[in-house]
Image (spheres, coloured by chain):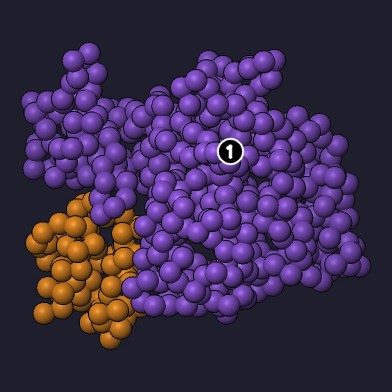
Chain colours: A purple, B orange
Amino acid sequence: MSLMEAFLGIAATCPRRPAIVHNGRPVAYAELARAVWAVADLVGPSPGAVGVLAAHNAGTVAAMLGIWAAGGTYCPVDPAFPAQRRQAMLAAAGCRSVLDPDDVPWPADDDGTPRGTLAAVDAERPAYILFTSGSTGQPKPVVTPRRAIATVTASLRDLFDLSADDRVLQFASLNWDTCLEEILPTLTTGACLVMNDDAHTGSFPRFLRLIERDGITAVDLPTAFWHELVHYLIEDRFALPPKLRLVVIGGESASPARLADWASLDTSRVRLLNTYGCTETTLITHAADLCGPQAKGGPDAYAPVPIGRPLPHVVQHIGVDGELSIGGPGLALGYRGLPEATEQRFTTIGGMRFFRTGDRVEPDADGVLIHHGRLDNEIKIRGIRVNPAEVEVHLAAHPSVGAVAVAPVTVADHVALAAYVVPRPHADLSTLDAELRAFLHDRVPRHLTPSRISIVDHLPHTATGKIDREFMRRQLP
Amino acid sequence: MSVEGVAHIFGRVLEVGDVQADADFFVLGGDSLLATRVLSAVARDYGVELTFDDFAFSPTPAALAARIASVR
């Protein structure tokens, strides 16, 4: 059964059940279904790729499902990104139109039956296009087919053990694929998706009050945010709300110290699930129960913290260099308009198609994978993949920049981007830092903007003439 | 007095030494995650629950101390 059939089936059998509660206002399954059909009418049959100015609201969810109902491809574009970046994304995705979720019609209940016919679309056709960081300075569009998202959503309903009684927080930005882990398993189970501005204020007391007040049972958090949450719970001795049963984390390596902190709190009834996956392999491919009722060992057993075992839909291959490759129905079609980049990362092993993740892994005695870093320079900034070369391309375009290198540094126990800039002779050094920040502000999203910019005389090079990134990592103030 | 208190919070969170009253948290290497630590510390020390928006408009010890004083 397709995702859309599952969602519409619930709308037909339980029309009054809340699908979404947005800032306290419930949107019933039937109401959402009517908006979905209204969006399908709005975009017309087979609309191709449709850009959506995605934000935390019910209109964005209706837009996504409506575009699918019409047979189109959903392409979220963050309205907070610089205009130049948004244009580049829409062009790279081949979007012919852009939909503002505020323009989604919400038809009133007429005879109670949402109408419409699902477009018959081949499972190999694209469902959505999302972007990842490339080395050229241009956003790199990943095209995910309907087959992949349908398979993985079914797999995640099982992994999360979701039921119609669950209330799932919508926390992730609508512009990254993690939000689909929250939205799709929920809306194809008959559960309720909770969207609330209090989740995004940066205040942990508000965040925890929201979970308590709205009876949230499951949250899916970036590991970096979970680290901060644990920090807060420890320092302020705040208890977790009683209905919370599942905490999913992912995006970067979990800290063994924070895991030990978590285990020392009153968390034994909460399932803490570590997850791993790439946009190109669709949401989650590996998972491990770290704490709670389904965890096997104590948290002390984990240093480093494992990324887990492959989910049932995943085929994995570990190369001689330890590189993890992923095969199976979760694979993306490739990078749109970039055949060489696609060929580089999507390879054939033993007659089967695989995606080379670039992550080095090692299985322990039980086959649980441990992550051992990257085979390339890619890093994670607050859970988002960043290729430092992309930031270098943008900085190098500034007229006062002679040479530039970008590398990860550790600021107060987490990873941030640092840029090392060799100015051109005419550059005004007193204003260069501010100028470069303003220059990037107009061109790239926040996660591609360095936290620190250092003006240097020359870039350190290794014996082979490459930029010495390890040296830079050690040198930062 | 509270400017010094906030500067001390910045210094502790960013793991740097003395922070000037007009130093911008984000130029010193802070990001949204570290900002949550500042907000937690402000709530603890001053009993004031601020948000990212408050902080984004008042990212220096002097401005944030003024913001705290205005809501207390």
Residue B47 visible to an observer of this rendering? yes
Looking at this view, is A66 or A180 the one in front?
Answer: A180
Q: Residue at x 49, y 45 (%)?
A: A306
Mark yes or no: residue A85 visible: no
Q: Position of residue A1 (x, y in %)?
A: 85, 45
Looking at the image, the residue that sits furthest to the bottom is B72
Q: In the rendered image, which quarter is residue A395 located in?
A: top left
Closer to the camera, A128 or B10?
A: B10
Total tally of numbered discs in the picture? 1
Name the side, left or right, on which B72 lies relative to B8. right
- Foreground residue among A275 and A406: A275
Residue shown at 40% from the left, 54% from the top: A256
Q: Chain of mark 1?
A: A
Point out the residue furthest to the front here. Answer: A365
User: Considering the image in quadrants, where does the C terminus of chain A appear?
Assistant: top left
Instruction: Classify residue A368 as left or right of residue A476.
Output: right
Coordinates of residue A16 in the picture (x, y in percent) = 81, 71
Residue A427 sits in which quadrant?
Answer: top left
- At mark 1, the secondary structure is loop
- Find disc 1 in the rendering and name its residue: A367
Answer left or right for A13 relative to A142: right
Where is A430 relative to B27, above or below? above
Q: Position of residue A289 (x, y in %)?
A: 58, 54
Question: Which amino acid type is shown beneath numbered disc 1?
Answer: Gly
**Which residue is at 84% across, 60% downward?**
A10
